[in-house]
Amino acid sequence: MNGAIFLSAGVPDPKRGPQYAKTADTVAITAAVSALLHVTLGRRLIVWGGQPAITPMIWVVSEGLGLDYAGWVKLYQSRYFKDEFPEDNQRFGNVTYTDDIDHDREKSLRSMRERMFTEHIFSTAVFIGGMGGIVDEFDLMQQLQPRASVLPIISTGGAVLDIAKRTATSMPDLIDDLDYVALFHRHLGISVKEQRYRHPDDQPARLEDRLWRPAASIKKGTQMKEPGLDDRHRDKDGRIQQKRSDTKNGNLSQPIPGFASKTTLKTMREKTGKTSEGEIRKAAKKRR
């Protein structure tokens, strides 16, 4: 599928990559990946070589949106790591297994990445956190798909900082904008009005035909207003209900950096003196 998005992301392991773990912001990595999924799933194909800490998140978000996970996400894994495959792999038909080359880790990874970059045409490659592997993927992407845009989310830290140096990016929002949902809508060129589709085959070929229109969503007693920047809809009189105070940061579609995943909205409201999620997010940014 043309126009697919390549995701290269990971949470650095302090033992295997202490230099990357030192600069990585785990909450920001999780928030960025979650935001990317909420912006793209049901709209663009996501392709990646799975990282154990993130693969389950992709499935959970996809299921929550009511989408065909196997249709919108393509996961590549090398048989070199067959003893480490997540059990979830057996439940879905979206995994492409590549050969174990001479029982050599680097050769096997190279073979897997070459498959990814030759079987799809990418519009953008998104890099989040990670260790040395995402730098290797960046280098190979530059060789095999030089026309693809590169989007390093610098605020997540980790190996993506090395990629940022190589690309000499001059976009300050990649460094300090923690509103990842808006950031991805902006940089990927995906309108908040673009509707999601359960399976890629259901998606119209023309972008204009995918855009949300009032007439298409009016049902008796359930008229919806235009979707907002956070991808939620207001009800017909324009109100949005506040999230429950016991909602945990880790359960938000985009966790708020600066707070632990188990911190509740009630606690965050008390610490920032703000009420809405957007206001809390802005206040948390100033606290960092």
Image: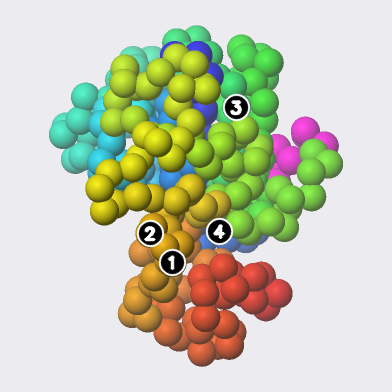
Instruction: Indicate the position of residue 252 as horizontal and vertical percent values.
Output: 41, 63
Question: Mark 4 highlights which residue?
Answer: 28
For label 1, the crowd category at 10 Å Cα-Cα, with few meaning under 14, some 14 to 19 and many 20 or more, is few
3 or 4: mark nearer the eye: 3
Label 2 sits on what residue type?
Answer: Asp
Q: Quadrant of the C terminus?
A: bottom right
Q: Which element carries disc 1, helix, strand or loop?
A: loop
**Which residue appears at 74% of the width and 40% of the height?**
164
Question: In the rendered view, would you say 249 is above or below 55?
Answer: below
Q: CA distance from mark 4 to mark 2?
A: 31 Å
Label 1 sits on what residue type?
Answer: Arg
Tell me which label, 4 or 2, sits earlier in the chain.
4
Question: Mark 2 highlights which residue?
Answer: 235
Magenta span dominant secondary structure: helix
**Which residue appears at 50% of the width and 10% of the height?**
118
The answer to whether residue 239 is left or right of residue 256 is left
Question: Mark 3 highlights which residue?
Answer: 124
Tell me which label, 2 or 3, sits earlier in the chain.
3
